[in-house]
């Protein structure tokens, strides 16, 4: 799917919305390491299960995570292992850009 298409743009926008919240970022990074159960994620991120459930629902709706039934429990994992690589690449790029202080308007405009 070419990125310039409406579908490609929609996919990127959904990914951006998912990353717009620090808790969802932490969830994605945790799931990048290994699949997890909700109770483990709630403990690890030190958030309530209700709050966690809302964030996991958002990530499911964005198509970034999937559930895998394991007996009577449900485990969460990234929908595609390439998402883990994309998160690593994005984080590296953002850190590199943040280290570049050439943006003249960063402090006054809060844009960068």
Image (cartoon, rainbow, N blue to C red):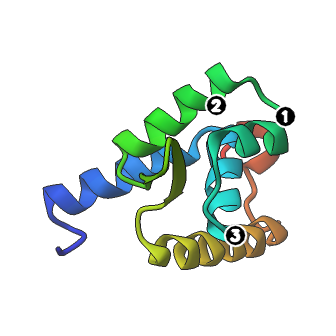
Q: Is residue 98 above or below residue 45?
A: below
Q: Which residue is mark 3?
A: 33
Helix, strand or loop at mark 3: helix
Q: Which residue is mark 2?
A: 52
Q: Compare residues 68 and 22 and report the one nearer the observer.
A: 68
- What percent of the width, then of the height, locates residue 109? 70, 38
Quadrant housing the N terminus: bottom left
Helix, strand or loop at mark 2: helix
Q: Which residue is mark 1?
A: 46
- What percent of the width, then of the height, locates residue 12? 36, 57
* Residue 36 found in image quarter: bottom right
Which of marks 1 and 2 precedes in the sequence?
Answer: 1
Q: Compare residues 22 and 80 and report the one nearer the observer.
A: 80
Q: Residues within 10 Å of mark 3 (few under 14, many from 20)?
A: few
Q: Is residue 87 above or below residue 14?
A: below
Measuring 64% from the left and 31% from the top, which residue is drawn there?
52
Q: Is residue 95 left or right of residue 20?
A: right
Measuring 35% from the left and 40% from the top, which residue is drawn there?
61
Contact, mark 2 vs mark 1 (Cβ under 8 Å): no
Is residue 14 among what the camera can see? yes
């Amino acid at each position: 799917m070419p990125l310039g298409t409406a579908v490609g743009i929609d996919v990127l926008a959904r990914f951006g919305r998912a990353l717009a919240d620090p808790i969802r970022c932490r969830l994605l990074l945790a799931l990048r390491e290994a699949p997890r159960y909700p109770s483990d994620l709630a403990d690890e991120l030190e958030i309530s299960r209700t709050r966690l459930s809302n964030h996991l629902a958002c990530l499911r709706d964005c198509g970034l995570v999937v559930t895998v039934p394991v007996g009577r429990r449900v485990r969460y994992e990234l929908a595609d292992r390439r998402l883990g690589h994309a998160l690593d690449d994005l984080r590296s790029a953002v850190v590199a850009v943040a280290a570049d202080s050439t943006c003249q308007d960063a402090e006054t405009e809060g844009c960068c």
